[in-house]
Amino acid sequence: MIRYLFLFGFFVCQVAWADGVSSLLDFFNNTSSMRAKFHQIVVDKQGRKTQEVDGNMLLQRPNKFRWDYQKPYEQQIVSDGKQVFLFDPELQQVTVRDLSKTIGSSPAAMLAGGENVEKSFTLKNATRKDGLTWVLALPKDKDSGYDRVLLGFKAEKLRKMELYDSFNHVTHITFDDVERNPELQVSNFLFTPPQGVDVVGE
């Protein structure tokens, strides 16, 4: 089952910034759109891999995003800025949710909104010996479902993201071919349920 992580990876940093917190805040001030490929792996608390998937993502601020999971199975997450559509072709089902209720104080709030990131998260610089500049985001809402989020930057691009949930599962996301501020079409963020599928939710 695809973990609908809205998000999954919408941050690019400036080389001039010397720490992860500044890199993250720079993204919110200077990135209006983003396009990237992603590779996502989920491991359980024993360290066993439970999911591996590839796909493409788009972001158009404020609050519009699209995640297309392509291999080994297809699923889509699309936000038009007001509602989020989760489409599972295998189940022939579309789940519709109000964006404000879906985001809450979660990594999605950081990715889709951003301007108020410091109201929802405590941000701290983190250090690893891997050549990346890391920032640690701790949700202030204890019911967000996530214990912490880590983001690693290099050469003006977000390269890795790690999400640690309350079940001790870890989601690792690697981003490639990142484009900052590409010109995107409005139609990329519009979703019309295919004929014959079940539509549930709001």
Image (cartoon, rainbow, N blue to C red):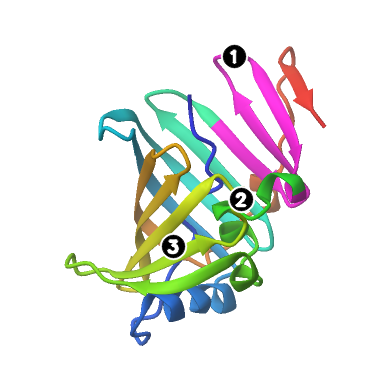
| Element class at badge 2 | strand
| Element class at badge 1 | loop
- Image depth: mark 2 or mark 3 in front: 2
Name the one closer to the observer, 5 or 71.
5
Using the rendered image of the protein, determine whether residue 128 is visible from the camera's viewpoint: yes
Name the one closer to the observer, 172 or 184.
172
Within 10 Å of the Cα at label 1, are there few (<14), some (14-19), or many (20+) other Cα atoms?
A: few
Kindly indicate the quadrant of the structure image that contains residue 51. Answer: top left
Residue 70, percent across and down? 43, 31
Within 10 Å of the Cα at label 2, are there few (<14), some (14-19), or many (20+) other Cα atoms?
A: many
Which is more N-terminal, label 3 or label 2?
2
For the point 39% across and 60% down, the residue is 150
Q: Amino acid at mark 3?
A: Glu
Residue 170, percent across and down? 37, 42
Cα gap from disc 2 to disc 3, whole angstroms: 14 Å
Disc 1 target residue: 91
Residue 179: give its label.
Answer: 3
